[in-house]
Structure formats: structure tokens, C-alpha cells
Image (cartoon, coloured by chain):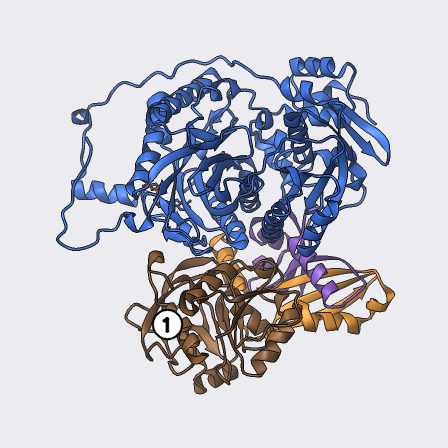
Chain colours: A purple, B brown, C blue, D orange
């Protein structure tokens, strides 16, 4: 069993990385790309039944995986 | 020796590199802005440290696509000597001039301090003023210096004498404790197959001046000047 | 536009008296844009309303002072047409809410204060205070702050060479992050902020404006309560890569001879920068807010005036120099926009697509910012404790071990090894000594820098404590062989509306002033951070000082390490 | 129109950040978590019809967004 977590910047929060990539794609000759936003994608193996609840993973996100001041997160549990 | 230092947006050891080279060469190298599409006629190119493009996405990834890098790759393939230090090393791997990648330090922290390096290959134009096995003292300052290559690549590097420097203790012993960033085989610097391209995380240009606490970096530039004049 | 209700006024932090004064100055009820501007201009953070009266008593002059307090940073002359420009500033509240970004943007802000005046930054320092090491929040705060300082400073390529870091329970709910930047300029090429020349273009360059940190300046002046973690979305994110480009672009622009006046957009962004520039120059200004480069759609004039987006500058150009300036910004891939012009009306007129959305008199607003003589009581000196009266049940060796392993005393190597303290190739005296020593590039001169504060002394006796800090910086500079020259200060205290706290402020300032006068050691810049309190408990009084000294020949410098066996150890002093 | 790109480390490549998170979750008292792998999640706004092909985005990944020596990528185009 696995949890897949997406951590993304909240709306309106500056994304210096995304901005720089946007710009670099332009210089590389890739036209037609608008805004770029860069987030994290985290995969966690779950070994213990007790941990498999979504709530538990959400707690991990709040405490460690995401910086909830500026980031949102989204948890998906897969087999 | 005719030398050039490449400057990217976010390079910040370009001046350090210029001064380091000047100590051995007696004059300033040319500084070349990354948007240039041609290099002056040089026989030595230095890619300096810093945070080109903020180290965003992956260290060195965006700089590797700068217009000037096409020229640097071309010259390197023609045999021109290329030295990449710190961010410069990251850029050379991203540009495909050197194998492997530099990942986040194992302890995830930025590290700035003097470390010891064991000279593994003292028979190159970069290193022939050191002796093989010698332990030299050179500073590091990086967040992503953890050298990784797959087993096959690693075996090739070791087999061809492409490992230039390894992290070691003051006595020259290559130990786990001395491996500050988790690099495979304690690797601190590697050469390409033809040995005209060297990439290393530590900063030889920062220790070429007694006022700064040592000169263990200077023999590298002295060796290059001698080889290329 | 919404009507101004008493709730809206209160939300903007204006007291009843301040609101009355505001109505008087305007001669009518202000609209929301105008109210927003009053609120940031009169916040403690921008107006120094509680401390101004006392700050005026500090000595600020000496023959080698080129520019004292009042500009972005202080400037001293180090000979050979070279000047050192430096200042210390706090980012305490933002660093508590988001330690990494709070500390990082603190570094960005103080660097801008220094290069705005024409200096290339040559080193950074920081002074940190956290709660008890085992307090539940401390670890998170310490690692975030240290990483943030390193993350920003390392990336812009300015060495962080010295600082201090202590722990005490009074900082459990209010950590302190004070940062100092030191820059080197040509003494005959310094830039100031007073706008001049009716008709001259007002130009914006740097990053785009987003909705970052709106209300940040008012937040920095309000006491913390339990629910203040809710204010989180106002956190600004720093972009050190853009700052590095901004440093290079600004210094390059300064060589073109096109600048009349320049100012960075710090706390309260466009509002305070444009007000200060116009007020200092005695001119009016007209801004076309729709011309401001924007990061997001649907931004309002109110948001544009109050945004604290980082890495932005405001400059008044000489007539016709727009193209020259734009070429420099294009080279460095930075935003550039002409957003207004200077006028002779003495007013600030804000326009949005041609329509006037705000019209405020500049001088009355800037000069009438409130100044308080807050009531204070002198701190009672506690009874003296005689050494003989203290029962001791530990041996000397154990006592020594306890002392040197205390987090306040133990080596701070774990901090400075996370900072690049060697970049720029002039760090002659690295962290770990009494002062760091940075070579003046290309010469044999050196600049010694240190930051110090002993809050426990200030708490027991603010006057003596204030004197002791000055003396400590003086000793630290002297110890490496340099001559102490000048000081910057960052006065961190609790709520000044409490007479005991105000007493600490007054006592410390008087002590610092007396010691500086005695030593001929002027204070050339500084910053005040008040309301460092949570639920009525204040921090220890923490007036941090940063000092700069000069050594003519770095080969004569001394360092802390014992050099050789057999050499004599001598104790100097009383 | 948007492209969503996942960049993940190849099997066998050491992930220092994942390891550190794994360890930190343990210290925080979250039991039952096995391996943690950290990748990137990139969102690109596509403004130009010509750029909307999956192939085009895959080229961007090969050239810039991923380092194919150590990373895999996955592209999804959404409306
Ligand atoms: N936050 C910090 N950043 C950089 N250097 C630091 C920091 N904290 C302490 N240091 C360095 O550690 C050494 C000892 O600091 P401190 O105990 O405050 O010195 P002292 O009491 O002698 O003034 C100094 O060289 C100082 O610059």
C-alpha cells in the first residue's frame, strides 16, 4: 500500500523556481508555455495497517511534509 | 595560457575564480557572459561556483542550456581544458561533459568548511604539481555535492583513473567520517575520459592566498599555467 | 469603494486620536486607499512613534561619519575614497510565523538597504534569540531561521561572517532575528533617497508586485495573540536569485549617471518608499498604479500600494534616461516600468487607468506622524548577591563543564558552517573569533565586524547593560587589532505601552548613548522592534549592536587561536 | 489547457531527502512508514495550440525538466 502526496504552493504565493523555469523554457525555444508552478510529489510506502488512514497521512503533511503557511497538500491512498 | 571564466546569472564565485587564476597567471582571465555565442580564443575555460539560476529546478540544469555552453562543449571536445568548480561541476554534469550527478548532501545541510582531499590522480595537467596520495586542504561550500553514478559508470571512472580527488582525513585516510556529503566512493572531483575536463565540488580558488589561510589550491592553477604556456 | 466604518479604522490599527488627526490632515474622510497608507505610515514599524523621542539622544556624529541615521543605512569614511555602508534590521515577527522565509526576506531587505546607497555588500551578520532549547517550537524555529539566512545569503553570494545566538525562555513565543549587512562604496559615488526635479520620471524595477505581505508592516507592530498564526497568508517569499541580479543591475545602473534618487521598497513597499522620497525632496508625486508590473490578475490600487513583494526598487531618473536604465534591466532580465512623475503640488496623487483614486498631502502626513512620550518607570536594581552567600555543591570541573556545554556558551560552528562565510574571497578572519575580518578587496586594509548583546545585564540594570554592550563590541573589534569606528543598533523590546518596558527602553538607550559618547563611537543607523510579547509576557530587553572597525594592514591582525607551545598567557584589564 | 508532469527518481538511485523524511517521520512518532521517495510535480499552462502535444512536453522533460540519468518523468495533458 502506498500514499501519494502532492504539495503545491498556495495561490498567490511567489514561485521563484516556476518563474525561472518558465523563462528558461522560453530561451530554449519552447513557445506557448504560460505559467509554470513547481511542487513536490511524495510517495510513502505504508507497512503498517494503523498508518493507512488518510487522516494519519494528512497529519504527516501538516506536521512535516508540507509547509501549510504557504503550501497546500493533497493525499491519495493507492493499493 | 589564455583563460576565460564563464559568468551565468547567479554565478557568485566568478570573481573568486578570476582572482585565483590571476595569482598564478599574473593577469586577469577574460570574463564571458552566458548570453555570448562565441568564446574568445582560449586554451583554458573555468566554470565558476555560485547559484546560477538560483539553483532552481536542479543545480546547473538551466545554465547547461545557456548559449555559451554549446561553445564550451565544442571546445572541450576539441581538447581545451575545462575546470568546473562547485556549481560549475554541476553544470558540466548537466551539460553531459562529465558523468554522474550531484545530489542533495546526505545530511541535507549546506556545508561550508575546509576539508581534506586525497589526490588520486596526479598525472593530469590539473594535478601534476601535487603528488599521488597527498592530502591537501581546500574549502567546500555547497548544498548539493553528493556525487552519484550507477555501478557501471562508477567502475569505469575508477578503472580509467578518472577519479581526481576523494574526501579524506588530515592524514589522507579515505573514511566514512571524512565523506562530508555522502558521495559514492568519497568522490570529490572527477575527470572526463580524455582528462581535459575536471569537475570538483571543493574550491581550490579560495585557497590560493596566505592571507586567506592557505595556498593548497594554487598548485592546480600553477600546473595549468605551466602546461599551457 | 466601501465606506470607512469605525471597524475598518480599527482594523488598520489607528487609535481614536490618530483617526482624528488623519481627518484633520485630509480635511475630509479618506477613502480606503488613503486609509491604508495612513495606517502603514503611522505604524510603529515605519514611524518609530514610541522610541523617536529617545533615539534623538544618541550620539551620531564624528569626523568620519558621512551619513548618520535617517537614510537607508549609515556611512563611514575609511579613507582612500572608500566608504563602509552598514545597518542592522529585525525580521522577528515574520520569522516566528514562517522561520525560513521570514529570515530569508530579512536578509534580502537589509542587503537592499545597503546596495541602494551604492555599496557592494561585502558581508552579513546576524543576531538570533530563541526560546528554551527543549521548548516544543524551538527546534523548528532554529532550523528554519538558520536555513533561511543561509539559503538567501549563500545564493546571493555575500559571506555571512559573524553573529550570535542565545536561548532563553523569554523568547519562547517571540524569537528574534536581527540581520546586518555591510557594504563597500566609493565615497564620491553615494546615492540618497531625496527626490528632486519636477517632471522627472518615477521608475520601478526588479520583481513584479504580488499580494505578498499586505499588512505586514502593521503586523510587525502588533502584539502577538494566540490566533496570530491565522495571519499566515501575508508571508512574503524571497527570491535570492532575483536579488543577486538586482544587486548587479543596480550597481551597473549607478555607473550610468542616470539616477537622481533611489530607494528600495521595504516594509510598506511602494507607499513608504514613494512617501519618503517625495517628503525628503519636498516635491509632489503622481503615480499611475496601473503601470506597476503585476504578478496576479485583478490587483487593486490598495494592494499595489501596500504589497510587500520583495526584490523591488524605486528610482527617480534624470530626464530622458529611461532607455539607458531599461537597457540595464533588460540585460539582467528584470522588470522595468515608468510608473509616474514628480510634481510641484506637494501631494501624492494615485491614478488608476486615468482616474484619481487617492490624493494625500505628503508633508503633513509624513511629518505629523505621531510621536509619543510614553510613561515609564525606572527599573529597580535587584539586591546584590554576594558570592559567599551562594551555596555551591558542584566542583570546579563540573561547573566548568556545565558552563561550556550550555547552549549559549557552546561553539556555534553548527550555525556558521551552514553559511558560506568565504565567498567573495576576502574573508581573512573567519567566524569563531571575537570579530570577523573582511579584507577591502584589492587592498591590505581590513574591516572588522561583530554583533553583540547581553540581555540578562540589560534586564537587571538597563543603563549599565546598555553600556556593557557598547564596551563588548569595542573589545571585540579591538581584539583583532582593528580600530572601532561606528555602530548600528537594533532595539528589541516588549510592549512600550507598559511603563516597565518603556523604562527598559529608556535605560538601555541612555546607557548605550553614554558609552558611545565616551568612546567617540557614533551610532550611524539602526532599527527598533517593539511589541515582542505574547499574552502579556515580554522578551528580555535585547538591544543588539553591530559594530565596524578598521585595520590598516591585515597582516597585523590578531586572532583567538593559541599559536605555539611555550608562549606566555597574559591577562589585561582590571 | 495544462500539462501535469511528475518527475521521480529512478529505482536504485539513492534519495537523500526521502531518507531524511523517513527518519523524521519516525522521530515524530509516525510508525508504519516504509520507504519515502520525493519527486517533483510541475504544472505548465499551455497557451499555444502548437505546444499542446504530449510529444512536445516530453521533449521539454528530456531537455530540461528531468535529468534522465537519474529521473523518470510522466506527462499528463488536462483541459
Ligand atoms: N548566528 C551566527 N552566525 C554566524 N556566526 C555566529 C553566530 N552565532 C555565533 N557566531 C560566531 O561564533 C563566535 C562566538 O560567538 P559569541 O559567543 O557570540 O562570541 P563573543 O561572546 O565572543 O562575542 C563568533 O565568532 C560569532 O561570530
Question: Along the horizontal axis of the image, is A63 left or right of C210?
Answer: left
- Chain designation of label 1: B
Q: How many marks?
A: 1
Q: Is C352 rendered above or below residue A8?
A: above
- Kindly give the residue lying farthest to the bottom in the view shown: B159
10 Å crowding of disc 1: few (<14), some (14-19), many (20+) = some
C530, C347: nearer the viewer: C347
In this orientation, does residue C117 appear? yes
C216, D13: nearer the viewer: C216
The residue to which callout 1 is attached is B219
Residue drawn at x 18%, y 24% is C389
Residue drawn at x 55%, y 62% is A48
Task: Give coordinates of residue C99: x percent, y percent.
Answer: 53, 44
Task: Give coordinates of residue B104: x percent, y percent.
Answer: 52, 64
C201, C462: nearer the viewer: C201
Q: Is A77 rendered above or below residue B190?
A: above
- Quarter where residue C23 is shown: top right
Task: Give coordinates of residue C131: x percent, y percent.
Answer: 43, 37
Helix, strand or loop at label 1? It is helix
Task: Give coordinates of residue B9: x percent, y percent.
Answer: 61, 59
Quadrant in which ligand 1 is drawn:
top left
C399, B30: nearer the viewer: B30
- Quarter where residue C393 is shown: top left
The image quadrant where one finds the C terminus of chain B is bottom left
Amino acid at each position: 500500500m502506498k500514499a501519494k502526496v502532492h504539495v503545491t504552493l498556495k495561490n498567490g504565493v511567489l514561485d521563484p523556481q516556476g518563474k525561472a523555469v518558465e523563462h528558461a523554457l522560453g530561451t530554449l525555444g519552447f513557445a506557448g508555455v504560460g505559467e509554470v508552478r513547481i511542487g513536490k510529489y511524495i510517495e510513502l510506502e505504508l507497512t503498517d495497517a494503523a498508518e493507512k488512514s488518510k487522516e494519519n497521512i494528512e497529519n504527516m503533511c501538516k506536521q512535516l511534509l508540507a509547509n501549510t503557511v504557504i503550501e497546500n497538500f493533497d493525499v491519495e491512498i493507492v493499493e | 595560457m589564455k583563460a576565460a571564466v564563464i559568468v551565468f546569472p547567479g554565478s557568485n564565485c566568478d570573481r573568486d575564480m578570476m582572482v585565483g587564476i590571476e595569482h598564478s597567471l599574473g593577469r586577469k582571465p577574460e570574463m564571458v557572459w552566458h548570453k555570448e555565442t562565441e568564446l574568445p580564443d582560449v586554451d583554458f575555460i573555468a566554470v565558476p561556483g555560485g547559484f546560477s539560476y538560483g539553483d532552481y529546478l536542479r543545480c546547473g540544469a538551466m545554465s547547461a542550456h545557456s548559449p555559451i555552453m554549446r561553445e564550451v562543449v565544442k571546445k572541450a571536445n576539441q581538447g581545451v581544458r575545462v575546470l568546473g568548480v562547485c556549481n560549475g561541476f554541476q553544470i558540466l554534469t548537466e551539460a553531459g561533459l562529465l558523468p554522474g550527478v550531484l545530489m542533495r548532501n546526505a545530511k541535507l545541510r549546506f556545508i561550508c568548511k575546509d576539508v581534506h582531499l586525497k589526490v588520486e590522480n596526479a598525472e593530469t595537467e590539473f594535478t601534476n604539481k601535487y603528488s599521488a596520495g597527498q592530502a591537501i586542504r581546500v574549502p567546500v561550500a555547497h548544498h548539493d555535492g553528493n556525487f552519484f553514478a550507477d555501478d557501471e559508470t562508477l567502475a569505469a571512472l575508477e578503472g580509467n583513473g578518472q577519479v581526481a580527488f576523494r574526501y579524506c582525513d588530515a592524514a589522507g585516510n579515505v573514511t566514512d567520517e571524512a565523506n562530508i556529503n555522502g558521495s559514492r566512493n568519497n568522490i570529490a572531483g572527477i575527470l572526463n575520459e580524455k582528462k581535459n575536463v575536471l569537475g570538483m565540488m571543493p574550491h581550490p580558488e579560495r585557497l590560493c592566498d596566505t592571507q586567506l589561510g592557505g595556498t593548497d589550491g594554487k598548485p592546480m592553477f600553477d600546473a595549468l599555467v605551466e602546461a599551457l604556456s | 469603494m466601501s465606506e470607512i466604518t469605525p471597524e475598518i479604522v480599527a482594523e488598520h490599527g489607528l487609535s481614536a486620536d490618530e483617526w482624528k488627526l488623519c481627518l484633520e490632515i485630509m480635511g475630509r474622510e479618506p477613502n480606503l486607499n488613503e486609509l491604508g497608507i495612513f495606517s502603514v505610515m503611522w505604524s510603529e514599524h515605519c514611524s518609530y512613534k514610541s522610541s523617536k523621542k529617545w533615539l534623538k539622544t544618541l550620539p551620531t556624529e564624528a569626523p568620519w561619519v558621512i551619513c548618520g541615521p535617517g537614510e537607508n543605512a549609515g556611512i563611514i569614511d575609511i579613507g582612500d575614497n572608500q566608504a563602509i555602508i552598514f545597518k542592522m534590521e529585525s525580521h522577528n515577527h515574520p520569522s516566528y510565523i514562517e522561520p525560513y522565509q521570514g529570515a530569508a526576506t530579512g536578509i534580502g531587505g537589509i542587503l537592499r538597504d545597503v546596495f541602494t546607497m551604492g555599496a557592494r555588500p561585502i558581508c552579513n551578520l546576524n543576531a538570533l534569540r530563541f526560546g528554551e532549547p527543549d521548548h516544543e517550537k524551538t527546534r523548528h524555529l532554529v532550523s528554519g531561521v538558520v536555513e533561511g539566512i543561509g539559503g538567501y545569503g549563500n545564493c546571493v553570494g555575500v559571506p555571512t561572517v559573524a553573529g550570535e545566538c542565545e536561548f532563553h525562555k523569554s523568547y519562547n513565543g517571540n524569537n528574534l532575528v536581527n540581520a546586518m549587512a555591510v557594504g563597500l562604496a566609493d565615497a564620491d559615488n553615494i546615492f540618497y533617497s531625496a527626490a528632486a526635479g519636477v517632471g522627472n520620471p518615477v521608475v520601478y524595477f526588479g520583481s513584479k508586485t504580488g499580494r505578498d505581505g499586505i499588512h505586514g508592516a502593521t503586523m510587525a507592530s502588533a502584539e502577538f495573540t494566540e490566533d496570530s498564526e491565522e495571519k499566515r497568508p501575508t508571508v512574503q517569499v524571497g527570491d535570492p536569485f532575483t536579488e543577486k541580479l538586482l544587486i548587479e543591475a543596480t550597481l551597473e545602473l549607478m555607473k550610468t549617471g542616470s539616477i537622481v534618487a533611489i530607494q528600495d521598497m521595504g516594509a510598506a513597499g511602494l507607499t513608504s518608499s514613494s512617501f519618503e522620497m517625495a517628503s525628503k525632496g519636498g516635491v509632489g508625486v503622481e503615480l499611475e498604479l496601473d503601470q506597476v508590473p503585476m504578478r496576479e490578475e485583478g490587483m487593486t490600487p490598495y494592494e499595489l500600494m501596500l504589497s510587500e513583494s520583495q526584490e523591488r526598487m524605486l528610482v527617480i531618473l534624470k530626464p530622458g534616461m529611461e532607455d539607458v536604465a531599461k537597457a540595464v534591466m533588460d540585460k539582467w532580465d528584470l522588470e522595468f516600468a515608468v510608473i509616474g512623475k514628480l510634481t510641484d503640488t506637494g501631494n501624492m496623487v494615485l491614478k488608476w487607468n486615468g482616474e484619481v483614486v487617492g490624493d494625500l498631502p505628503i508633508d503633513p502626513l509624513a511629518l505629523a506622524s505621531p510621536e509619543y512620550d510614553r510613561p515609564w518607570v525606572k527599573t529597580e536594581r535587584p539586591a546584590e548577591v554576594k558570592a559567599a552567600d551562594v551555596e555551591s555543591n558542584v566542583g570546579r570541573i563540573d561547573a566548568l563543564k556545565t558552563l561550556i556545554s550550555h547552549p549559549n556558551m557552546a561553539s556555534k560552528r553548527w550555525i556558521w558552517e551552514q553559511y558560506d562565510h568565504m565567498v567573495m574571497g576576502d574573508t581573512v578572519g573567519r567566524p569563531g573569533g571575537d570579530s570577523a575580518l573582511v579584507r577591502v578587496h584589492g587592498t591590505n586594509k581590513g574591516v572588522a565586524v561583530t554583533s553583540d548583546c547581553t540581555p540578562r545585564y540589560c534586564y537587571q540594570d538597563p543603563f549599565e547593560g546598555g553600556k556593557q554592550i557598547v564596551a563588548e563590541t569595542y573589545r571585540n573589534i579591538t581584539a583583532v587589532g582593528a580600530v572601532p569606528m561606528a555602530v548600528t543598533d537594533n532595539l528589541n523590546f516588549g510592549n512600550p505601552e507598559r511603563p516597565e518596558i518603556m523604562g527598559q527602553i529608556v535605560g538601555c538607550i541612555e546607557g548605550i548613548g553614554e558609552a558611545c559618547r565616551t568612546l567617540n563611537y557614533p551610532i550611524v543607523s539602526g532599527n527598533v522592534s517593539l511589541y515582542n510579547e505574547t499574552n502579556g509576557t515580554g522578551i528580555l530587553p535585547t538591544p543588539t549592536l553591530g559594530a565596524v572597525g578598521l585595520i590598516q594592514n591585515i597582516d597585523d591582525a590578531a586572532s583567538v587561536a593559541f599559536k605555539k607551545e611555550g608562549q606566555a598567557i597574559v591577562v589585561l584589564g582590571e
